[in-house]
Image (cartoon, rainbow, N blue to C red):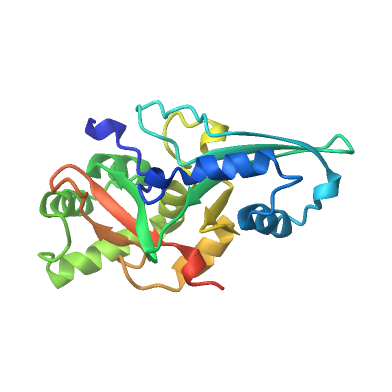
Amino acid sequence: MSNTSVSGRSDSHRGLKYEETLRDEFDKFRSSNHSAVNNLFHFLNINKTDISRINSTTNIPPLSSGGSAKTDLILNIKFNNGAQKKIKISAKQSTKNQVSFHEYPAKTFIDVLGIQDSRTIDLFYKHQNEGSAKNFLPTEKEHFKRSLEPKKLILWEWALLGKHHTGTSEDQIVNTIICNDKPFSFEDYKRFLMGKKSGFGTGFAWTRQSRGTGKTIQLKGPVLSFYQK
């Protein structure tokens, strides 16, 4: 896989086909007693009896770069009164309280975040090439943190929802995150991350890709179901 086609999606659930399990359960929503189904309806204040049909799919088109979209599952809900609602879900299932949310080359971070300061650009590449910020000088860490401060909302929306990526379609942009059967909104994640000082004040853990250093920067984030009961 080339650098430009890295998706940034978490691998935590892929082996278990979690999104396919959810798809099948939502398809049979009338008879399903799966906790994710019940929790999502409660979260959205939806009564099962008000629903006439749910069409669900895990067939999400890839990004224009060739990578996978953040969206794992789309629910098209049709109600008895003729109304419709589309839920675009990022599905995460893990026994760990943090998983990989995002992985892209430094250049993509720089482009999406609109970084123009040459020193900050150099620090992105330094992080990518070394796999961490352990060799950053204190002044470099502070500069990087200050540079990211006005970019945090864009970073969060990009890493969690898939917004701001060139050529992204509406179906590729998430509006609900399900972690271990519990649904959360972007605002839930935003409130949690705003209170964190880690990751240069972004709340993410900045690290290297599992395949080695020098190609991408990986962001690990919370599986929120472990933090909010």
202 or 172, which is in the foreground?
Answer: 172
Quarter of the picture holding the N terminus: top left
Residue 5, by quadrant, is top left
Instruction: Count the labels in the image.
Output: 0
Q: Position of residue 167 (x, y in %)?
A: 45, 28
Residue closer to the observer: 145 or 85 = 85
Residue sitting farthest toward the right:
81
- Residue at (30, 66) in percent of width and height: 200
Residue at 60% of width from left, 39% of height from top? 24
Instruction: Write the residue at 23% across / 69% down.
Output: 142
Q: On the rendered structure, is 173 left or right of 81? A: left
Front one among 126 and 6: 6
On screen, residue 129 above or below 202: above
Is 162 situated left or right of 131 in this image? right
Among the 4 quarters of the image, the one containing residue 174: top right
Query: Which residue sits at x=23%, y=44%?
Result: 106
167 displayed left or right of 22: left
Q: Against 55, is 184 above or below? A: below
Counting from the top left corner in percent of width and height, residue 196 is at: 40, 72
On the picture, is 122 further left or further right than 20?
left
Counting from the top left corner in percent of width and height, residue 229 is at 56, 73
